[in-house]
Amino acid sequence: MKLHTNYSLKDYNTFGIEAYAKEFVAVQSVNELKQVLQENKGKKLFILGGGSNMLLTKDIDALVLHINIKGISVISESDTHVNIQAMAGENWHEFVLHCINNNYGGLENLSLIPGNVGTTPIQNIGAYGTEIKDTFVSCNALNIETLETDTFTKDDCEFAYRESIFKGKLKGKYIITSVTFKLTKTDHKINTAYGDITEKLIDNGIIVATIKDVSNAVIAIRQSKLPDPKELGNSGSFFKNPIVPKTIFDKIQSKHPLMPYYVVSETEVKVPAGWLIEQSGFKGKRFGDAGVHSKQALVLVNYGNATGQEILNLSHKIQETVFNNFGIHIENEVNII
């Protein structure tokens, strides 16, 4: 456990942005985490997981704590279900594959999402009709001030669309150290209704899908649309899909009858942000080394040497144009640092 100064974070963020930490330390256990916090009490902290949901626009004038705590264990199980705990530093996709290989169902639609387990509840990550909250049991989190570990249930976390209590009133107060999920061992609830999953399964000649089949379909779809961060810097979906009141949506749809949508409730409708961005002419466009991916307009990319500020400026331009065209504001899903 070594503390570094003026440390490059280029390899610790999936955008591949060159930025420096005033101080940096990686911790491998909860005890190491407590020790670092105790020895550096009063210092400004920046908690770093997999670096997959952030855009660095400047150097970090703080002690960057890289949470690299590993481990997967079964907490309890019955004939039909299993409660499985993953430590915060576990790679999310590798954890999903571990569950699928053990025939534990519930996370297959979340395959190939970048990042680590510890950050998944913060964002309530989701894809293809599934969110973390659907299988979440609890998480353990270390109180930065008291160094005590508290357990948060699903209700405690106040999950909403890409939101949780850890992005709200408890932001900066806790560090998540582990997450526990309740997954199925039998009678898996196969969810293929969202996106292109059904079509992909049909293409593969699969009529009755297993959780492995669904995972493979999701992986294939994501690989066909989303660039690998190791090859092209990105953070996945940069924007949230906006949820708008149905009354407003009806007025917009009257002008844009081909606009796709998903009914959220009797009063709200979700509109794909990627469609709005594509219709605004940004898909595949490049501005220096910052650009919009050619296959998925939701994804902003770093073609090599873009700065975080250049990517942020592009996002602002996209937001402004979409609002002018459709009267809909699209919010960042990525955290701007």
Image: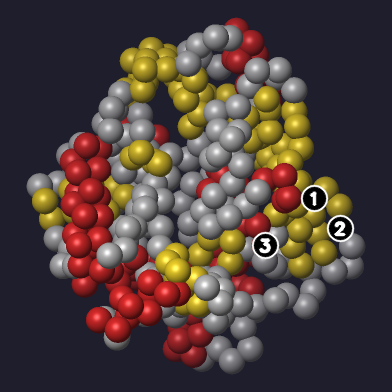
> Circles 1 and 2: CB distance less than 8 Å?
yes
Label 3 vs label 2, nearer the camera = 3
* Image coordinates for residue 231, horizontal then vertical, percent: 29, 51
Q: Residues within 10 Å of mark 2 (few under 14, many from 20)?
A: some
Question: With 140 as the anchor, is 167 left or right in this view?
Answer: left
Q: Quadrant of the N terminus?
A: top right
Q: Residues within 10 Å of mark 1 (few under 14, many from 20)?
A: few
In this rendering, the answer to whether 64 lies above or below 332 is above
* Residue at numbered disc 2: 77
Question: With 160 as the anchor, is 261 left or right in this view?
Answer: left
Q: Which mark is residue 42?
A: none
Rendering quarter of residue 21: top left
Q: Earlier in the sequence, mark 3 or mark 1?
A: 1
In this rendering, the answer to whether 22 lies above or below 29 is above
Q: Residue at x 67, y 66 (%)?
A: 106
Q: Residue at x 36, y 22 (%)?
A: 60
* Image coordinates for residue 40, horizontal then vertical, percent: 56, 9
Q: Which mark is residue 134?
A: 3
Q: Residues within 10 Å of mark 3 (few under 14, many from 20)?
A: some
In this rendering, the answer to whether 279 lies above or below 202 is above
Q: Tag 3: residue type?
A: Asp
Which residue is most to the right?
Answer: 78
Q: Tag 1: residue type?
A: Val
Q: Which mark is residue 74?
A: 1
In depth, the one of 169 and 277 nearer the eye is: 169
For residue 287, say whether it is visible.
yes
In depth, the one of 55 and 318 nearer the eye is: 318
State the SS at label 3.
Answer: helix
* Image coordinates for residue 83, horizontal then vertical, percent: 79, 54
